[in-house]
Image (cartoon, helix red, strand yellow):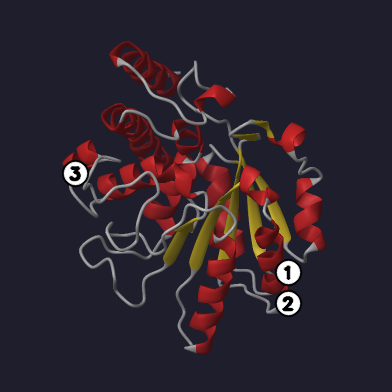
Amino acid sequence: MAVSEQEIKELEEIAKNTRKDIVNVTVWAGGAHIGGALSMVEILVILYYKYLNVDPANPDKPDRDRFILSKGHGGVGYASVLARKGFFDFDLLKTFNQFKSPFGMHLDANKVKGVDVSTGSLGHGLPMAVGLSLGARLRKESWKIYCLLGDGECNEGTVWEAAMAARQFNVTNMITIVDRNQLMIDGRTEEIMGLEPFADKWKAFGFIVKEVDGHSFKELAEAIDFAGNQDEAPVVIIANTKKGRGVAYMEDNVKWHYGSMNSTLAEQARESIDKMYAA
């Protein structure tokens, strides 16, 4: 399912608008985990617009593909993509993280259409993905499951327990993606709890590893195509990204793991996004 140049142009336009949506929702909410939301935009956009078998008009259809945002604090980005895809009216996001809103900082599968699993406490997405994958196998169902982790989240032992189980049971209907922006809430991943050699760790657990530019639709598509046709071992895609991507004053800046913006900063963010896509 290669991605054409025309498709890339269309996906870039969606990504640009999604980044602006994330800025707007962060303003409405009074603050959000915006840095990591911006770093994963291309990953979510290509999944929802190119690969995932999902239907906004029938979000619970049994044969749909499943998606788990294991780095659940990126809910502001996830919700923005779901709204733009048509799972719910975008204006509902004006209540994001407000009293009695269905949209908390971490999205609740019982309240938000299109969300398969509630996440937030890190390290649980991959274990759930492995379990769902095995369940699909037992029921002889052919849908796939995609799980997006944060790199800081890979400090959690449950990630590696799940990785070990995935290889033991040869879970190949699951595609794992890591948003490798190299920053976490309190600093750089390599200073807080070093992950390198990161690819080698996954290989040691029996995974096939593909490393890509996580902001390149072409590279992401090639890796997802490869993973989708692989039945020898589970695949992990390490997507190298930049935290705060698109907003110059946020990029690679740990201060914007979580942040709030006044109207001036928000306008600067939108202008920065436009400038990046005009280049």
Residue at left offset 31%, top offset 60%: 114
Quadrant assignment, res 189? top right
Mark 1 and mark 2 in contact? Answer it, CB < 8 Å: yes
Disc 3 to disc 1, C-alpha distance: 40 Å
Q: Position of residue 20 (x, y in %)?
A: 33, 29
* Pointer 2 local density, CA inside 10 Å: few below 14, some 14–19, many at least 20: few
Query: Which label is found at residue 164?
Result: 1
* Pointer 3 local density, CA inside 10 Å: few below 14, some 14–19, many at least 20: few
Decide which of 205, 104 is in the foreground and name it. Answer: 104
Residue at left offset 67%, top offset 53%: 156
Residue at left offset 35%, top offset 33%: 22
Q: Is residue 83 above or below residue 241?
A: below
Q: Is residue 194 left or right of residue 229?
A: right
Q: Position of residue 259 (x, y in %)?
A: 44, 26
Q: Which residue is mark 3?
A: 92
* Pointer 1 local density, CA inside 10 Å: few below 14, some 14–19, many at least 20: some
Decide which of 105, 47 is in the foreground and name it. Answer: 105
Q: Sequence order check: which comes first, mark 3 or mark 1? A: 3
Kind of residue at disc 2: Gln
Kind of residue at disc 1: Met
Q: Which residue is mark 2?
A: 168
- Helix, strand or loop at disc 3? helix
Q: Position of residue 32 (x, y in %)?
A: 40, 33
Q: Is residue 75 above or below residue 206?
A: above
- Helix, strand or loop at disc 1? helix
